[in-house]
Image (cartoon, helix red, strand yellow):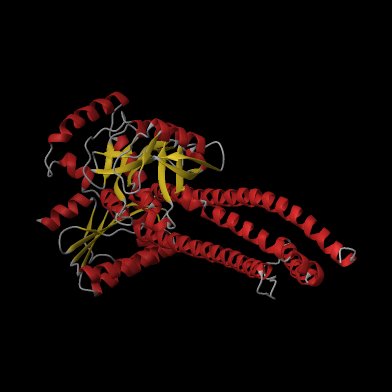
Amino acid sequence: MWKSLSLKLILAFLLVAAVAIAAVSLIQTMQVGKALIDDSGQLLHTRAEAEARLVGSILDTQILRLRGIALNSNLHQAAIRQDAGYASDKAAADQISAYDARWPTANANDPLITGVLVSPIAAELRAQARLDQNIAELMLTDRHGALVAASSITTDYGQADEEWWQRAAADGLFIGSPAFDTSSGSFSIIIAIAVYDQAKGSVIGVLRTTYRTDAMTLQLTESRLGDGTRADLLIGEKILKPGGSRLSTPSAADAGAIIESNSSDYTLANYEGLPRLMARAPVRPTREAGDLGWAVLLFQNRSEALEPVSKAQTSTLITAMIVLAGAAVVAVISAELIIAPIRRITLAAERIAAGDLTQRVGRYSADEIGRLARGFDQMATSLQERIDAEHAAQNERMHIQQAMIDAQDHRIEELSIPTIPLGHDTLLLPLIGSIDQRRAERVLHTLLADVHVRRARILILDLSGLRDVDGEVVAVLMQAASGVRLLGARVVLVGIGSQTARTLVDLNIDIADIPTYARLQDALDELGG
């Protein structure tokens, strides 16, 4: 019996297999455990980076919103007009100081208050604030720091002594740390940008938004992150909890864990009194903002995060025992059954690594390798679905962004031809700058629509700001006047310049039946009388 070669080979194989399986099981347990810990940590770090990018994108969105608002020519004109009202820099400082002292006690009807809160620019700022419920306030200052317009009442009139104003005016951009803002009465951050004269490139003012932190912390709630993952927003050496309304200082132990989390992609440390798997990622908005010192910290209970490691170790031990018990049988009759599936999995893995995500193992057996093949296919399917979902999400974001740009372009075009109500039945249309054929036709369309919708009885066309008017444009404006009269409204012309008058004479256009005035005030006095 013992002289049987087959038996000796089987015994020798079993002995070698036993030693090999024991060694392999030990090494595999250590490697798999390390790999799973690394996978869990890397996955947590990847999620932390995604959340940090999301927070950064929220800041980017607000910066882009401010830059879009800052392009509004009405804001430029208002800031330049206010600056022109100062006799000198010293006169500006004296006036701002006087207004700043008067501001806290001024009533709602004080011209100082209404000039900031009731102007068309303030109305535009309020309209922009309504586009996002997390915008607590918007304000515009001139280059001396005095308020030009605001969406809501502020605590001060002069802003030049504020850090946000000084940094934005000097550097072009300021992003503050979360804090309670007394002007808006909310826990928020201040974002401010410099407003530049597009012709000269000089700073003509500062535009600021106060943005509530709810939009950022809502992204970090446990219910959204799922699977027991929690998050903190690190602001320098402080912590902002999701849904929190204050910055807290971590304990010495937690501060050490936070510092340790910054030394690698992930770390195992005690945090908030419990062993945790932690990962940290910096929040990086636009490059212009520089390093804010913000970071997203994700953490899980160590037992939950490393549960796959424990299962893998148990599974490895069980597998080793099963393999040892059946090693003799496997050696004789199952070599090909083991090698063939492994070969298919390897081939599929190589093709996937080469970029063919459609590759699958396809044939599953009932053993561990079959489950591995099925799990491999499921992983490949999940990877492909995730990539497809990311592409779809990117396309959707680009579509939404384009829609926002189109809407802003349409809004800007509408604001270029403003009709101003003067009372319940009178409209004023001030025409400023050069008017080409396209803008004249736009005036015709907008004017008739506004007269009809507002049921106006009197329309005042203020031509005092026009320049470079040709015959075609004058003809379209006269068509607009005729159309207004057909709608039952009177047309009054104000500020006809020499060039416009010469064009009317050259075209033989009779305006004898249209009242004309040299100045807008003369027309208002006459009509009001």
Most distant residue in the front direction: 1
**Residue 272 percent coordinates (x, y):** 39, 40
Q: How many marks?
A: 0
Task: Answer with left or right where residue 449 lies relative to residue 228.
Answer: left
Q: Quadrant of residue 383?
A: bottom right
**Residue 257 percent coordinates (x, y):** 46, 36
**Residue 396 percent coordinates (x, y):** 49, 65
For image coordinates 22% across by 46% down, the residue present is 117
Task: Answer with left or right where residue 326 lies relative to residue 281.
Answer: right
Q: Quadrant of residue 140?
A: top left
User: Between residues 423 and 105, which one lies in front from this camera angle?
Assistant: 105
Most distant residue in the left direction: 529
Most distant residue in the top direction: 90
What is the quadrant of the N terminus in the image? bottom right
What is the quadrant of the C terminus in the image? bottom left
Q: Does residue 20 lie above or below 513 as drawn?
A: above
Say whether residue 509 is visible: no
User: Between residues 384 and 330, which one lies in front from this camera angle?
Assistant: 330
**Residue 494 percent coordinates (x, y):** 25, 55
Say whether residue 354 is visible: yes
Q: Does residue 313 lie above or below 165 as drawn?
A: below
